[in-house]
Image: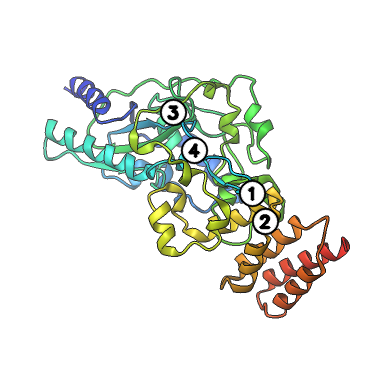
């Protein structure tokens, strides 16, 4: 019975826009236990993960009498069909690929809800389901690997044969028992391109990472970004794709299967200067449907300031001075002061220094005072 049902589900999955589906048992993920505890002990977690490690390992802690887990993958584009026009003096930032189009959490939840509705129709009222995407208890890549969707690469991402690592993952725990699919063997071999290319050394080479060092994590924090990551951030204001770009499995992969995942050029590569003063309403209307908006506008505004500094964009100085003078948030003011000192590093302006000194006298936050003080000292050295 479940074999016939499994085949029906596989066909339905294709029909509703699920690009890959796999089935596995609901036994605990014993191999994760030691790894997850060690990551936490070493401070390698991001803080965005589910807090209770046991609930990430034992499906029966979060679901009554689980029998199977259904894993799904939805492929997303890796290239933009059309990029915004290049205009002299207009610098743009960029969102990483996983934030292109509509928020993938919403897309996958919709796909899974439709799949669950279909399975309910094909079974009895006693069937139960628990869907989750990214923010759920289970480790998405571990479920997907065990369900045969692909293997976990050295960069910690699931790598599929058909779509490389450019896939969103979700899973559904159920009390229906399905025959499990076969796992996919590790396929990285001796390749360490992702580890070598990682600009911060976040990848440990065995599928684990120090999330605190990952640029994707750093672009999503709300406080000051540590100085050692600012230059390495470049102009990507949300996320990081470097370990995916260099992966041989992603060569030539560019999946355009779902309209809601298509990137809108002006959103995925936004002008940086307008971001500095965007209102909450404008931000929500423009970026609210993107996954990259989940932390609000503050981290993205900070990152936009850092990107302007990395561009050494002198035309941004008036806007940055305005931020220093008028923005109500200390962290944004301090980052702007730092950016000004980076842009004017080789040609310091006494008037700008005086302006920053006057602004510094009004600051009370210790971190912000340090940012201003360092910025001013750096500029004075070059007078």
Gap between marks 4 and 2 measured at Cα: 28 Å
In this rendering, does residue 226 appear at all?
no
- Residue at (34% x, 38% y) in the render: 260
Q: Is residue 323 left or right of residue 281?
A: right
Gap between marks 1 and 3 measured at Cα: 46 Å
Q: Is residue 109 left or right of residue 240?
A: left
Q: Earlier in the sequence, mark 1 or mark 3?
A: 1
Q: Earlier in the sequence, mark 3 or mark 4?
A: 4
Please say if 293 is above or below 4.
below
Q: Quadrant of residue 261?
A: top left
- Residue at (45% x, 20% y) in the render: 161
Considering the image in quadrants, where does the C terminus appear? bottom right
Considering the image in quadrants, where does the N terminus appear? top left
Please say if 72 is above or below 293.
above
Say how the picture is coloured: rainbow
Please say if 50 is above or below 335.
above
SS category of the residue bearing label 1: loop
Q: Residues within 10 Å of mark 4 (few under 14, many from 20)?
A: many
Q: Residues within 10 Å of mark 1 (few under 14, many from 20)?
A: few
Residue identifier under label 4: 97
Residue identifier under label 1: 89
Residue 244, x across and y down, in percent: 56, 31
Task: Tell me how many marks there are.
Answer: 4
Q: Is residue 293 left or right of residue 258?
A: right
Residue identifier under label 3: 145
Residue 269, x across and y down, in percent: 52, 44
Residue identifier under label 2: 315
Gap between marks 3 and 4 measured at Cα: 22 Å
Considering depth in this image, is 239 or 300 the residue closer to the camera? 300
SS category of the residue bearing label 4: helix
Q: Earlier in the sequence, mark 4 or mark 2?
A: 4
């Amino acid at each position: 019975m479940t074999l016939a049902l499994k085949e029906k589900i596989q066909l339905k999955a294709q029909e509703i826009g699920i690009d890959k589906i796999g089935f596995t048992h609901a036994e605990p993920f014993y191999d994760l236990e030691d790894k997850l505890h060690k990551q936490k002990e070493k401070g390698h977690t991001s803080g965005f993960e589910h807090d209770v490690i046991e609930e990430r390992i034992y499906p029966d802690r979060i679901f009554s009498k689980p029998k199977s887990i259904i894993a799904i993958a939805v492929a997303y584009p890796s290239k933009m069909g059309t990029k915004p026009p290049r205009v002299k003096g207009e610098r743009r930032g960029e969102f990483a690929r996983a934030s292109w189009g509509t928020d993938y959490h919403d897309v996958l939840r919709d796909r899974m809800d439709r799949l669950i509705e279909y399975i309910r129709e094909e079974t009895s009222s006693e069937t139960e389901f628990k869907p989750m995407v990214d923010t759920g208890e289970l480790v998405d890549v571990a479920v997907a690997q065990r369900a045969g969707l692909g293997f976990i690469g050295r960069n910690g991402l699931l790598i599929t044969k058909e779509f490389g690592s450019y896939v969103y993952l979700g899973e559904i725990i159920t009390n229906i028992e399905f025959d499990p699919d076969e796992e996919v063997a590790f396929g990285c071999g001796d390749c360490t391109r992702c580890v070598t290319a990682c600009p911060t050394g976040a990848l440990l080479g065995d599928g684990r990472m120090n999330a605190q060092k990952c640029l994707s994590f750093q672009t999503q924090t709300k406080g000051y970004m540590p100085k050692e990551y600012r230059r390495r951030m470049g102009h990507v204001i949300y996320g990081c794709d470097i370990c995916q770009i260099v992966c041989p499995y992603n060569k030539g992969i560019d999946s355009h299967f779902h309209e809601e995942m298509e990137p809108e050029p002006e959103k995925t590569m936004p002008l940086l200067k307008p971001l500095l003063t965007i209102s909450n309403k404008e931000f929500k209307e423009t970026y609210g449907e993107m996954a990259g908006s989940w932390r609000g506008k503050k981290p993205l505004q900070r990152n936009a300031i850092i990107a302007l500094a990395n561009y050494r964009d002198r035309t941004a100085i008036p806007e940055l001075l305005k931020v220093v003078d008028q923005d109500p948030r200390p962290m944004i003011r301090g980052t702007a002061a730092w950016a000004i000192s980076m842009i004017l590093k080789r040609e310091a302006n006494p008037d700008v220094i005086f302006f920053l000194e006057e602004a510094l006298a009004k600051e009370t936050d210790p971190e912000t005072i340090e940012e201003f003080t360092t910025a001013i000292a750096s500029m004075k050295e070059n007078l």
